[in-house]
Image: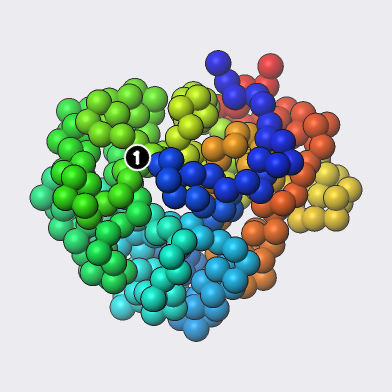
Amino acid sequence: MTTKSHTTPQLATTPHLLGGDLPVARMGFGAMRLPAGRLGGPANDPETSAAVLRRAVELGVNHIDTAWFYFHGEISSNGLIRSVLHPYADDLVLAAKVGPVRHPDGSWGAPAGPRELTAHVHRTLRELGRDRLDLVYLRLQEDEEESLDERFGALAALREEGLIRHLGLSNATTDQLARAQCVAPVAAVQNMYGLFHRQDPAVLDACTRQGIAFVPFFSLESLGRPEPTEPLGRIAARHGISPQQVKLAWTMARSPVVLPIPGTSSVAHVEDNIAAAVLLLTEQDLVELDALPAPGAVTG
């Protein structure tokens, strides 16, 4: 059954209890674009990236998503976060991903095994200057089956040690979510999801039913496909907002467990993105946007 309901005005601004105990604002921030506009470069100006981070927190963001493999040369998202925000506010939730292996030259290796995952968690702790990570995602590979139990189990062991508060999955299917839950509780799922890429809506449905945070990445992307000017432009003009804000407002309206983390290296864009957290689209707006064709979309 596909998620069709939309949030109420109250749900749009009510914090989500991540893992049942960490209140986070509905709109978060993804740190991938801080070192460079895209993985592989070119590098961003560190001062501009620092200003973006400061502005995001000033505007109420208390959920920042990062990863040790978000780096360009000597500039890393973890390093920027620590230099700008440490000592951290008591309510700041830092989420980190592990799973991929990235070499110092920027090239990628085979997925991390249990021992490497443990080392990457310790590396993230050092880089962020924390004794415990609020949330750690295991980034899964396509068709991952037998290795999931062992890899997720390694993170579950670190959770038992007190180094991780909550566990999550990234790039997960419903079957992988169910399998991981047999190993340890899952507090969040981070999948690619947005107006123009609504693949596997069953994962969002499962998260909604269970109260698990669904953290969409690339919500603003069309993945190289041309975007229709209508009804996106018409809805944006009617509300006096940007098309990007329409996309984010639509994404948040999918379910109260949706916590977008749009990333940017522009102060103006971060202000625009965060303002979308309180935008309320009409039911007609949502019906028109739901009807837009997208891979994996259900339109009837």
Q: Amino acid at mark 1?
A: Leu
Classify residue 237 as left or right of residue 211: right
Classify residue 160 as left or right of residue 78: left
Pick the residue in front: 275 or 20.
20
Q: How is the rendered protein coloured?
A: rainbow
Residue 182 location, quadrant = top left
Residue farthest to the left? Answer: 115
Q: Residues within 10 Å of mark 1 (few under 14, many from 20)?
A: many
Where residue 294 appears, as percent x and y from the top left, is 62, 32
Number of labels in the image equals 1
* Residue 143 showing in the rendered view: no
Residue indicated by mark 1: 169
* Residue 19 showing in the rendered view: yes
Where residue 292 appears, as percent x and y from the top left, is 71, 32
Pick the residue in front: 284 or 90.
90
Q: In the image, is residue 150 above or below residue 85? A: above
Q: Residue at x 56, y 53 (%)?
A: 25
Circle 1: element type = strand
Q: Residue at x 22, y 47 (%)?
A: 159
Q: Residue at x 35, y 54 (%)?
A: 134
Where residue 117 appears, as percent x and y from the top left, is 18, 51
Q: In the image, is residue 92 above or below residue 139? A: below
Position of the N terminus by quadrant? top right
Q: In the image, is residue 239 above or below residue 267? A: above
Position of the C terminus by quadrant? top right
Q: In the image, is residue 97 above or below residue 157? A: below
Where residue 97 appears, as percent x and y from the top left, is 33, 52
